[in-house]
Image: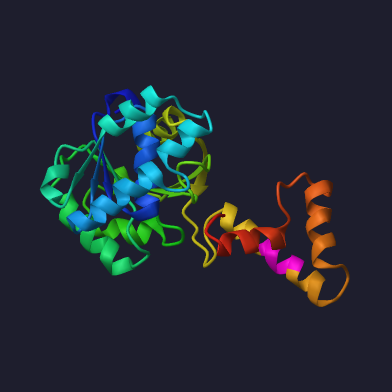
Amino acid sequence: MKAEDIKLIGVMGGGVMGGGIAQSCAVGGFAVRIRDMTEELLEKTRETMIEGRFGLRGAVERQKLTQEQMDEALGRISFTTDTQELRDADLIIEAVPEDLELKRKIYAELDTTIKPEAVFASNTSGFAISDLNQAVARKERFIGMHWFSPAFVMRLIEIIYAPETSEDTIQLLEQVGAKMGKETVRVKDAPDKYGFVANRIYFAAVAEARKVMEEEIASVEDINKAMRFGFNWPAGPLEMVAGARKGWQ
């Protein structure tokens, strides 16, 4: 399967993350259907996708999209509370909370619902893909697709492959990411409590910055300045911590 063969992407879980993923899919030209537990949750997701801080209307105001592109993207998005309405999806992107048993339960249900050739992609930030794929029969078509928040704005997607994941599945997710205007990196399934590649390195940098601060080697301001101007970081490590607490990373 190639990216151009994908007629429908299903997103399991709405909210800020699932909605941002769906926005990216729709703007990238894919039809996308979001599944969540209630109509109220779906309506909240829809409102955030349009009017939220990183929503489509803001993208139009910042001239990142035209009004026509926004309208076309919204026309590609549908909503459902019924898992059966994902049965024709070619790709499922799971974006539910980081609960191992919840994820496995969802995968097991979907594995008997969606067509055999469809691909599963989990937006897990730290669970081993080889643990998650135990819930499905199609292990060669099960992969990690770790997005960064806000998903519609951040360009990176980590593609995490288990030993059972096929090369065709990896390439498919790379093509899908490219069609959405994202950059992808391949990551071997070697989970760490802090994440895969980007978060793992980020938290290591933050830990070292805190040591420098605690040892009074430099002030917080100068630690951040050193990394901004010494390594051309957009923000210093201790600035990024403060930003993440406010809802971005």
Q: Is 183 situated left or right of 74 in this image?
A: right
Q: Is residue 248 visible?
A: yes
Up the image or down, 233 lies above or below 38; here it is above
Residue at 78 percent across and 49 percent down: it is 228
- State whether the magenta stretch is mostly helix, strand or loop: helix
Which image quadrant for residue 200?
A: bottom right
Q: Between residue 116 and residue 122, name the one nearer to us.
A: 122
The quarter of the image holding the C terminus is bottom right
Q: Position of residue 68 (x, y in %)?
A: 37, 22
Residue at 53 percent across and 56 percent down: it is 196
Residue at 77 percent across and 44 percent down: it is 232
Does the segment drawn in magenta span residue 28? no
Disc count in the image?
0
Magenta region: 204-209
Q: Position of residue 93 (x, y in %)?
A: 32, 46
Q: Between residue 69 and residue 96, name the one nearer to us.
A: 69
Q: Is 223 situated left or right of 181 in this image?
A: right
Q: Position of residue 184 (x, y in %)?
A: 51, 38
Up the image or down, 205 lies above or below 74; here it is below
Does the segment drawn in magenta span residue 206? yes
Which image quadrant for residue 134?
A: bottom left
Q: Is 25 situated left or right of 38 in this image?
A: right
Residue at 24 percent across and 52 percent down: it is 42
Q: Position of residue 230 (x, y in %)?
A: 84, 48
The quarter of the image holding the N terminus is top left
Q: Between residue 166 and residue 14, name the one nearer to us.
A: 14
Up the image or down, 202 lies above or below 207; here it is above
Q: Between residue 145 and residue 64, name the one nearer to us.
A: 64
Q: Is residue 13 visible?
A: no
